Amino acid sequence: MNTEYNPQPAWRRHLVVGIFGLLASVLVWRAVDLQLTDREFLQDHGDQRYLRVVQTEAHRGMITDRHDEPLAISTPVSSVWVNPAQLVQHRKRWVELAELVDMSEDQLNTLILPRRKRGFLYLKRHVKPAVAEAVEAAAIPGVHLAGEYRRFYPGVEIAAHLLGFTNVDDRGQEGIELAFDSVLTGTPGKDRVIKDRLGRVIEYVERIQPAAPGKDLALSIDRRLQYVANRELGKAVQKHKAIAGLMVILDVNTGEILALVNQPSFNPNNRAELKGEFFRNRAVTDLFEPGSTIKPFTVAAGLESGQYTPSTRIETAPGYFRVGRHTIRDIHNYGNLDVTGVIEKSSNVGSTKIALSMDADILWKTFNNVGIGHLTQVELPGETNGRLVDHKHWREIEHATLAYGYGMSVNALQLARAYATVANGGTLYPVTILRRAQPPAGVRVMSQTTADAVSLMMERVVQTGTAKTAQVYGYRVGGKTGTVHKNIQGGGYAEKDYRSLFAGYLPVSKPRLAAVVVIDGPRAGQHYGGLVAAPVFADVMHEAARILNLPADAIDGVPADSGVRMASSPTKTLPAGPRIQ
Amino acid sequence: MTRLALLALLGGLVFLSALQVVTTRHETRLLVMALQALKTQRDDLEREWTQLLLEQSTWSTHGRVEELARNKLNMTVPRASELKHIRS
């Protein structure tokens, strides 16, 4: 093939080169365009293909007692969630799914079908581990498990009112859980990572937010005392068919709350059972008139005024005493008593006479100083103030009735704090529910001499007076009973509706524990504080003293098997706490 | 001539460094995966720990211990007459 060379015209070559050049410049322009103008948008979308934000769960802090025994623990559980949009494409497997999560197919329909456009729906929260495993094994498209935390209270009902509880999203709703929610709640961490095709994390790009687990909280509560108090209080409330009961135990030297119990209680582990009316922590929210339990402070005022000594004689005959148009009565005519006798017999007439014989401001100051009508500022939600009217506004009848605890109101914690003050020799310590690292700074509000004298009088109350049922074998106990007519809404007092009180402490020679027992509305016949509330104190303190290893200070004081209340019956078995300290 | 040799040397070094980048990257990913596995293990252990803690405190509930002590082991609290106090 020998063809003759036939040169093409130059324009054809130029045309071809020109076309190629044009194409090249289009490509270059496009590249520049992508790189410069659309870069952010494209980069973003590119990243979305493989960059992921993963969350690290942060669990809620544990609540423990003073010996680090857990009272509330968060443990991981699984929740089943579905992607409705994906799930509606697999109707065949709904029967299987319904069975797994223990729902009927109808329920599934009504739950999922209206939300078919959505991408996320909790199907069942906090399922048992076995269910979670089954769901995972079934691998139904659009059904997933999410890790969550659920709160458990191993002590069940013993501290239900105190601790409160959390909602399904692990946020505090009541009690300690609510008051310290921000401390207990953790912050989940967020990391931006690169994931491969199989969903494995292959590179950490940045930490958006570090995970901060919730902090643990150590309460001042002693779980063993809490248990005993709850058990005995529960028994008493049942026995006396009472509406409610509560007990507070304080450490008199630090102001720490060692036990705080409400009855009837509830099970915080079972949310379905939770009903609003039971949650109130009556120890801080409910006010009552302290009645006779205030008399030791009336006498303390008398001693502080210098007008009285424990042996000053007071005439209480004929058993009643007129103040203006009102008559103040004793149960019996006690005749001529000394000041100790006034407390021992709980004479209204005697304490009124003491109160009226001194200036109003001395009485008011004594009450006010031990914190009557002042918030304890304990770290619990919903504390109420109490009420003690300023002495400038007192009428004579108020001056008189305040002497035996009517016309003022306190909460149980305030009363316990006042008794702790007498017990420790006159120093008021701030009350706390948290474990203290160091003893707090107290304020001296009563002279040591007065406190000691009042303390000896209160010991007489337990030895020979109205509170013999508060005796604890081996220990010297001081205390005072109270039986108060309950207020009627709209004014006046109920004839047959009572509140039985006991406040006391032990051991008298070196006080350690102060406690207040309130039984609200006993309906089984007995209503005197000495018969209803004081035995609870004795039963709890008997065990508390042993648990805390308090040295006995009345070994010879009470003869063995003297018929004194003591834990000699087999029902009083004492379990050892998990850790005795 | 020397310039050409230098160029070749640099080219070789660039190639080696490229290989190095690839290996390092691969190793990083392996390490990240190992870290991930360890984190999962830590979470699992933590889960197990809280569950054990919960179990322990449930078993050691005072009510249960008391019940066992009284009914199964026939334990009682000593009567006052059975107590001896020692003065220190």
Image (cartoon, coloured by chain):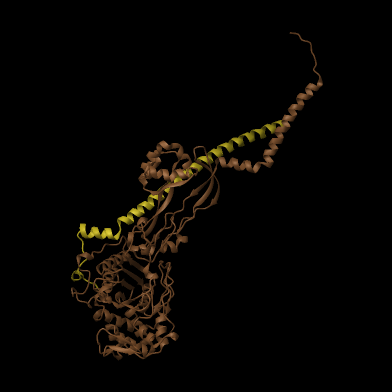
| Residue A132 position (above or below residue A547) | above
| Rendering coords of residue B41 (x, y %) | 43, 46
For this orientation, the residue located farthest to the top is: A1
Quadrant of the image occupied by residue A82:
top left
| Residue A133 position (above or below residue A448) | above
Quadrant of the image occupied by residue A538:
bottom left
Q: Quadrant of the N terminus of chain A?
A: top right
Q: Camera-side residue: A477 or A42?
A: A42
| Rendering coords of residue A125 (x, y %) | 41, 49
The residue depicted at 58 percent of the width and 42 percent of the height is A47
The residue depicted at 79 percent of the width and 10 percent of the height is A4
Quadrant of the image occupied by residue A534:
bottom left
Give the chain coloured brown: A
Q: Camera-side residue: A153 or A189?
A: A153
Is residue A449 visible in this depiction of the protein? no
The count of marks equals 0
Give the chain coloured yellow: B
**Left or right: A42 with respect to A542?**
right
| Residue A110 position (above or below residue A277) | above
Is residue A189 visible in this depiction of the protein? yes
Q: Quadrant of the C terminus of chain A?
A: bottom left
| Rendering coords of residue A79 (x, y %) | 42, 48
For this orientation, the residue located farthest to the right is: A10
**Left or right: A366 with respect to A119?**
left
| Rendering coords of residue A115 (x, y %) | 47, 45
For this orientation, the residue located farthest to the front is: A490
